[in-house]
Image (cartoon, rainbow, N blue to C red):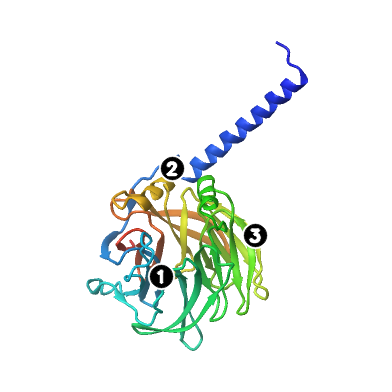
């Protein structure tokens, strides 16, 4: 059968559309971990520590761990707050830090100590209204002193923060869509609509854009490189950082077959990443508390400021901890938290 010009054009267009649809479907399934298998394993030992709902971010301050807990299934819970945990005294459990504002529901956080020994803790705060701020504190034992709060319309959906000094920081928006439908599109089709913001002490600057669900961010110890985990792209991006302007230059990506979450800097300068390898399982967990989702933790080797290789350190199908979001290391302890759980794992590294 011979086709005319219009028929051939229609067939070509249909083939192109079908190919695009198949690619979009494959990309969606791959980004949600449909083709990823999870084999449980860990060379050390772990114990569960009871926490308030949603211990989704952890930072070490010396031997103490500061844990940000937020009940993500509730609009605002009285248990939301910052908690102190000492891995050397696990039976004490978590102690809530005093000094936070009344409308305080913490997400990502980071801490830095200045030359004078004073600490600056910066926390992403999701307020009852749905708006966000970056709240800053100084720590004095089991109490905090609020030193400032920064708001901006550019803080659309901040997921993680890394502190440069007492005045400046980087923060990532995992999405820039402001409507429920737009966010559904971003999540379902893994659209690259995230960015990195730099606050220079006076104003926010967008220094990286078109990122695919950026969920974690960290600075190298020397401050010359920045790392961003792109969850839906299943990769870790390395950037060179201009120390004078804060601007970023892409320096490479490392593919890691999991939906990467927050990034922590280890005592040896290497990176630790928690991840949620099964995206659809995480979506089910959000809606059904009795569901489980696998967890993985990777250690990433850095050379010349660039992420080189990733080693799987911990993996579990969800029975031990479900949908890990953060992994922090200090003093031989690996702490793993999950955004929809009520416990963290205190693991001893081999």
Measured from the top left, where is residue 169 in percent x and y? 56, 73
Measured from the top left, where is residue 66 in percent x and y? 37, 73
- The residue carrying mark 2 is 36
Observer-nearest residue: 3 or 108? 3
**Quick one: SS at disc 3?**
strand
The residue that appears at 37% across and 70% down in the rendered structure is 67
**Quick one: SS at disc 1?**
loop
Measured from the top left, where is residue 303 in percent x and y? 56, 62
Outermost residue on the front side: it is: 129
**Quick one: SS at disc 2?**
loop
Quadrant where the C terminus is found in the figure = bottom left
- The residue carrying mark 3 is 250
The residue that appears at 49% across and 40% down in the rendered structure is 29
Please report whichever mark, 1 or 3, sits nearer to the chain's N-terminal start: 1
Measured from the top left, where is residue 132 in percent x and y? 50, 69
Q: Are marks 1 and 3 in contact (CB under 8 Å)?
A: no
- The residue carrying mark 1 is 105
Q: Is residue 143 above or below residue 308?
A: below
């Amino acid at each position: 059968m011979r086709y005319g010009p219009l028929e051939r054009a229609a067939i070509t267009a249909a083939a192109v559309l079908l190919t695009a649809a198949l690619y979009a479907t494959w990309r969606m399934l791959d980004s949600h971990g449909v083709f990823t298998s999870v084999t449980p394993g860990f060379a050390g030992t772990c114990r569960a520590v009871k926490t308030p709902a949603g211990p989704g971010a952890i930072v070490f301050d010396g031997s103490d761990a500061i844990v940000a807990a937020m009940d993500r299934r509730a609009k605002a819970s009285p248990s939301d707050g910052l908690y102190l945990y000492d891995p050397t005294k696990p039976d004490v459990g978590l102690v809530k830090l005093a000094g936070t504002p009344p409308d305080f529901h913490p997400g990502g956080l980071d801490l830095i100590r200045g030359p004078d020994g004073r600490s600056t803790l910066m926390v992403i705060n999701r307020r009852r209204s749905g708006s966000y701020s970056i709240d800053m504190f100084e720590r004095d034992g089991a109490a905090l002193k609020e030193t400032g709060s920064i708001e901006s319309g550019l803080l659309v959906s901040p997921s993680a923060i890394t502190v440069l000094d007492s005045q400046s920081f980087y923060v990532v928006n995992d999405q820039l869509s402001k409507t429920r439908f737009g966010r559904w599109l971003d999540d379902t089709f893994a659209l690259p609509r995230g960015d990195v913001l730099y606050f220079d002490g006076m104003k926010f600057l967008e220094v990286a854009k078109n990122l695919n669900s950026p969920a974690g961010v960290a600075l190298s110890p020397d401050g010359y490189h920045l790392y961003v985990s792109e969850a839906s792209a299943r990769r870790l991006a390395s950037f060179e950082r201009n120390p004078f302007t804060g601007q970023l230059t892409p320096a490479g990506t490392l593919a890691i077959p999991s939906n990467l979450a927050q990034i922590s800097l280890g005592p040896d300068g290497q990176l630790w990443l928690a991840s949620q390898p099964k995206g659809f399982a995480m979506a089910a967990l959000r809606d059904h508390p009795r569901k489980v989702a696998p967890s993985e933790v990777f250690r990433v080797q850095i050379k010349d400021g660039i992420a080189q290789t990733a080693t799987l350190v911990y993996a579990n199908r969800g029975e031990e901890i479900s949908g890990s979001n953060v992994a922090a290391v200090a003093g031989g302890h690996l702490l793993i938290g999950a955004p929809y759980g009520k416990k963290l794992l205190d693991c001893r590294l081999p």
